[in-house]
Image: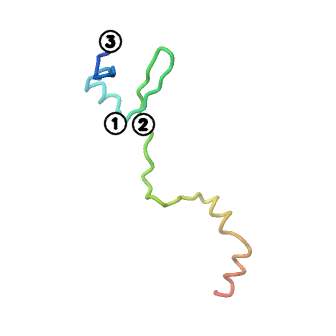
Amino acid sequence: MITTIIEIGNSRGVRIPKPILIESGLGNEVQLRVKKGEIRIVAAPRKNKTSKGVLLLSEKALDTDWNRPEEDTAWSSLQ
């Protein structure tokens, strides 16, 4: 599709027809990637939706942190 770059205030832009937006599957936020001779519009990276202050650790990290012999000794008196 050929279109025209238009003036939008102090900027310039391109109108994207609704059928093309629907077909692309893009949401409200996009990322612009620039390369000589082209501008690509791609989906913006999704934001992490975990709660603030919550850190998710991998099983490998937990295994290294939690499986210590000195902790087994400390907990043995409570069993």
Looking at the rendered structure, the kind of residue marked 1 is Gly
Q: Is residue 33 left or right of residue 28?
A: right
Residue 42 lies left or right of residue 6; in this view the side is right
Where does residue 61 sit, x and y in percent of width and height?
64, 59
Mark 1 touches mark 3? (CB < 8 Å):
no
Callouts 2 and 1 close, C-beta under 8 Å:
yes
Secondary element at tag 1: loop
In the rendered image of this protein, does residue 2 appear above or below residue 60? above
Residue 78 spot, x, y in % from top left = 64, 87
User: Disc 1 and disc 3: Cα gap in Å?
Assistant: 22 Å
Q: Mark 2: which amino acid? A: Ala
Q: Residue at x 47, y 14 (%)?
A: 37
Residue depicted at x 50% and y 20%: 35
Query: Of the numbered discs in the image, which one, if any, rests on residue 27?
Result: 1
Residue 29 on image: x %, y %? 36, 36
Horizontal side of 13 relative to 61 (left or right) equals left
Residue at image mark 3: 2
Mark earlier in primary sequence (1, 3): 3
> Circle 2: is it few (<14), some (14-19), or many (20+) Cα within 10 Å?
few
Q: Residue at x 32, y 36 (%)?
A: 28
